Structures are given as C-alpha cells and as structure tokens.
Image: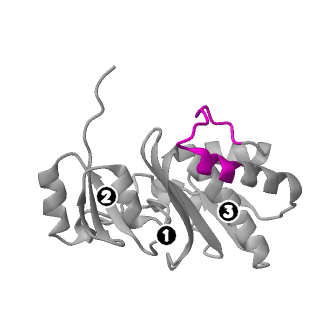
Amino acid sequence: MAKKKQKYYTVWKGHKTGVFETWNDCKAQVKDYQGAVYKAFDSFEAAKKALNSNYKDFIGKKTAFKSSLSEVQLAKIGQPNYNSIAVDAASSGNPGVMEYRGVDTKTKKQLFIQGPFEEGTNNIGEFLAIVHGLAFLKQHHSNRIIYTDSKTAISWVKKKRCNTKLVRSAKNKTLFELVDRAVAWLENNNYTTPIVKWETKAWGEIPADFGRK
C-alpha cells in the first residue's frame, strides 16, 4: 500500500492561525469557529507562503464564467430561480475531510454550515446538505426551492436512504449519527419543497460552492 502523502494545513481564520502538520491539529483550530478559513497544501513551503498571503488568492477565487452552451441551449434553460437556497459539499479526498453548507442563491449569504467531519465523502455531504435545507425551509415556513448540483444526492433523498459504501468506523461515528438523523427526518416528515438540479454548464458553479477546486 502506498504511503499517504504528508499534508500541511494553513489556517487563516480559526482559534489559532498558522501552519499545522496534522488534520487533528487543524481541526482543533477550526471546529466550532464561525467563519473558519483553511486549506490543505502538499508542502510546508506552499502552506507557509499561503499563510503570509491573502486567503482569497487561494480560496473562492472566481474568474468570469463563460458558458460553452449555445444561445439556443441557454435560452431553453433560462435563468436560476432566485427564490431559492443553494447547497453544496466539499471533500478533501474520498473519503476525506468533508463539510457542507447552504446559502441564499442570490446573495450567497451563508444560512447554515456543518463540519468539518474527519472522514466523509462528497456524496454524503451533498445528501446531508439537501436534507438540512429541507428541514431549514420547513422550519422557516418558506416556499423557496433547493438547488443542488448532485444527481446522486437527489436520488438518495427521493429514496429516503443514504446509499453510501463508506464503512462506519470510530472516525466517522459523528458523521453517521447525522446521516441517521437525516434519514429519520425524511421518513417522518412531509415536504413540498422542489429539489432542482443546478445547471452548472449554463450558470457556472453553484453559489454554495466552497471554491476549493
């Protein structure tokens, strides 16, 4: 088995800032810290250079999006419905460190966020994000729709099951407790909220994207 490559974690905003050599050390700085900003790098030098730079140069930096679709295709798809929220997940590895969030589609104001979880997958995060969004909108008596860019997560929600192949372990116990709660919510709640596929090819990255690609 190949040896796992060493990662270095830059924390720009957290309980403590700096470069950390293990995920556990990084997690201690970002867990329960509102608005934590961090990223993994392949070398200490790169992580240190990033720390002394503006995090916006490394996280969430956007370039102008230009669709490759034709005018006819774009016209057929139309524009996003801004009476909505958008959800997304980010996972560093598969499995790996995972988190998810929901934002207002138009303003990108963050409405909820969960994680980071030490061992998860992007599909699990996308599933949890949708269910969290459904519960959030129901709690607020909102008629907004939910956008997601994951067809897999949409199918899992429709089936009311998290069809992951990730094996339960002590490392992901907290995550699977949340999965169980999400499945129970789907089984015990009715909702009318439409779950809609975000048209990435027409509109660019979903507004809830973590910008770490």
Which is more foreground, mark 1 or mark 3? Answer: 1
Q: Which residue is mark 2?
A: 39
- Residue 21 percent location from the top left of the image: 25, 51
Q: Which mark is residue 57?
A: none
Residue ID at (47%, 39%): 95
The quadrant in which residue 6 appears is top left
Q: Which mark is residue 32?
A: 1
Q: Residues within 10 Å of mark 1 (few under 14, many from 20)?
A: some
- Residue 88 percent location from the top left of the image: 53, 58
The mark that comes first in sequence, 1 or 3, is 1
Instruction: State left or right for residue 25 relative to residue 157.
Output: left
Q: Can residue 212 be seen at all in this image of the molecule?
A: no
Q: Are marks 2 and 3 in contact (CB under 8 Å)?
A: no
Asked if residue 166 is among those painted magenta in the image, a careful observer would answer yes
Q: Which residue is mark 3?
A: 132
Instruction: State left or right for residue 138 relative to residue 109.
Output: right
Q: Give amino acid for label 1.
A: Asp
